[in-house]
Image: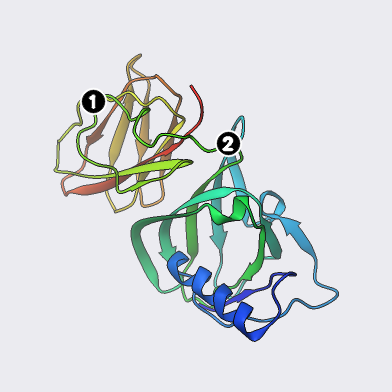
Amino acid sequence: MRTHFFSKHRNSVLSALLLAAVAAPLGLPGDVSAQGPGDRVVNILDEPRHRTMHVDGDIRLLDVQINPGDQTLYHTHDAAIMYTFISSGEGPSGGRVTSNTDYVNENFTHQVSNEGPGLFRIIALTNYGPPMAALDTDRPDGLAGEPQLENPWFRSYRLTLAPGETTPPQTHHNPTLVVQVTDGLTHVSRADGITAELTAMGSWAWRNPHAPFQVTNKGSTPVDIVINEARRAM
């Protein structure tokens, strides 16, 4: 997979190296190149491969899918974002979770291309709201263990469920996204009995703040899930 980057405020050799360093933790290695004068630039929310799947105030859920041989438009990041990597062009990514909050203070424009042979896919959360001052005051109830990622805009947990295993009821105080990141079959059940069925890597369910839910592995093999919060004032 090749990725091209451009930032209108960074055009020196040193700046190019800095852009490459930004790309690396996102799993998007590639060459740095300048944007052509005729290239169209759009906001990340208007890039057609960044499909907006859910809106909750200042928070957007994006399903990013780039087919083999395709590339995005040049698009500008202007908010904090958290990525759950589902697959690269070379295969499954294991549900790795990262975030970038630098875009809040310095917008960033780039282009991403996928050389394949498979689909490049990310489930992403953007948070246009203000940062939360304290890290742990709004942690969920009923979910043990430390988060794998936590910053003023986001929080993420990762769980492995054995066949038939069900989590205790958990209540999150922020908008919450449950993503299945391995093969399997899971149910995300609300307290009112309504259940979302996740059937594949990249399947997801949205849960509103203060609404208890449980996750059950309904399959015959272990399954991994990530539970991502977009933090905001309660």
Residue that carries the numbered disc 2 in the rendered image: 130
On screen, residue 5 versus residue 117, left or right, reads right
Q: Secondary structure at mark 1?
A: loop
Q: Secondary structure at mark 2?
A: loop
Amino acid bearing label 2: Pro
Q: Quadrant of residue 87?
A: bottom left
- Percent of width and height locating residue 10: 69, 74
Q: Quadrant of residue 145?
A: top left
Query: Which disc is residue 142 wearing?
Result: 1
- Percent of width and height locating residue 3: 57, 75
In the image, residue 198 sits, relative to residue 6, either above or below, namely above
On screen, residue 9 versus residue 166, left or right, reads right
Residue at 65%, 69% (x, y): give it: 111
Q: Residues within 10 Å of mark 1 (few under 14, many from 20)?
A: some
Amino acid bearing label 1: Gly
Closer to the eye: label 1 or 2: 2
Q: Nearer the viewer, residue 126 or 225?
A: 126
In the image, residue 15 sits, relative to residue 64, either above or below, namely below
Q: Nearer the viewer, residue 221 or 145?
A: 145
- Percent of width and height locating residue 100: 50, 55
